[in-house]
Image (tube, rainbow, N blue to C red):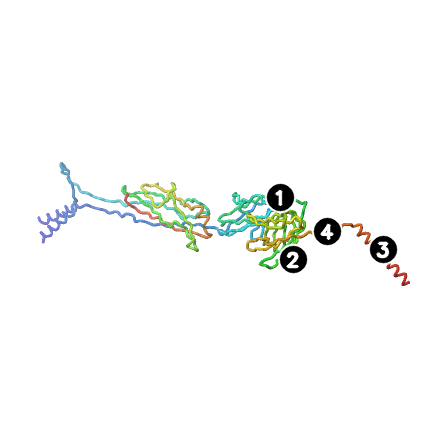
Amino acid sequence: MKKLFALILTVVMIATMSTTAFAANTTEGEADITTSIAPTYTVTIPADVNVQFNATETSFGAIEVEASQIHPDKCIKVELTSDGKLENSIDATKVIPYAIKDSEGAAFASATYLTEGDKTELSIHITANDWNAAYAGDYSDTVTFTVSYEDK
Amino acid sequence: MKKITALLLCFLTLCTCSVTAFAAEPEAEETNTVISVTVPDNHKITVTADSARVFYEGVSGEEFTVERLSEPRLLIRAESGKVIKSVMINGEDVTEELHGGYLDLEAVYEDKVLTVTTEDEPVARDDTYTVKGKVTLNGQPLDEVDLELRSTLKTTKTDKNGNFVFTDVEPGKHSLTALRDGKVIGYLSFELKKDNKADVVLLEDGTYTVSIDQNGAGVELHLTLNEEAGTLAPTEIGTIEKADPNSPQTGDNTNLSWWWLLAVLSATCIVALETLSRKKTA
């Protein structure tokens, strides 16, 4: 029984041993201790906004990373999901198309952020033609910002 | 000894094991944001008109409220002695879009400013004519309708048979407005011209040329009211013949001295007969 116990212990030891590579002329042994610190970050996303009638460009605020402590191989990704159309509250067939663009005028879908202070200014664009064709009433749309921690 | 060996083995096992601490990675988070907008129900049309009036739905005003995306029809009428020179909507010249005095706007999607300018219209007063006729709606005479004729303002009212008469109408550009209870129900823009025969022609701009037979005393028009369009369309025209100068005329004031002499003779005869009659009785 004792032999069996010693044998099992030996197997366990071998199985759980770190593989340590020794330099040819080194005689020292090493034990790896790996640890990981949980990342922390705060991302500010745009708040609800009311677009003024006939405004072709309206500030939507900014996506901004605050207090970021993330792994060097990782990034914070913010994705935006929207229908791209404001729906009439009474008749959903009546819509006003819109686009969300970044400060360079490109349509915004997602962005990655690495350090504190990284941000993307967003704006809502509705063309004059779309305004002109819009029926009277209240319109709205819900956009979803998904914030995830991903590999670079 | 075996126990010590086992203990040593255990210790070695613990010492050589990797200690792996897994930190929990944040999960993806979703946050919703609402974008909202309100599109107004109506828009304002503000009028700036110099010597002209603008009517919407038969009523004149300086500011109209129209439903969003509606296509309002505005009547623009110059005051007496004036004609429309230009019509601007939000700074864009739309004078060419006037049709028979009416301006049909495209779907209104914003507030608008309508600016109307006019200019003097010279009036030839040497010859004047009579313009008379009948106003009908769906073939039936239209009675008790107020009619306003311009350039020189003249007003009348249709009788029970829909008939009307304007006298001393000078050639030139005119408008005829039909009103009921103060609201415009019909409008006709026309130019009265002397010609060889009576005729009426509809022009591209929606106005009419009404030609008068220069040998006649005026024209007789049959005007058909289209309530929906707000127009009075001349559908028939005739010439009013000049009266025979030799025939007795009502209100003839020529040779007044002869008339006075006749009156004096008549009075003398009456007095003489009365005197004779009294003498015989005595």
- For residue B245, the mark is 4
Mark 1 crowd level (few <14, some 14–19, many ≥20, 10 Å Cα):
some
Residue B164 lies, with reference to residue B172, above or below; the image says: below
Which of disc 2 and disc 1 is earlier in sequence?
1
Q: Quadrant of residue A56?
A: top left
Q: Which amino acid does label 4 sit on?
A: Pro
Q: Which residue is drawn at 31% across and 41% down?
A: A114
Q: Name the residue under label 2.
A: B159
Q: Which amino acid does label 2 sit on?
A: Asp
Residue B140, position as x, y percentages in the image:
60, 59
Q: Which chain carries label 4?
A: B
Tell if the residue under mark 1 belongs to the same chain as the one under mark 4: yes
Towards the viewer: B166 or B62: B166
Towards the viewer: B25 or A79: A79
Task: Give the structural element (helix, strand or loop) at label 2.
Answer: loop
Label 4 vs label 2: CA separation? 29 Å
Q: What residue type is labelled 3?
A: Thr
- For residue B186, the mark is none
Label 4 vs label 3: CA separation? 31 Å
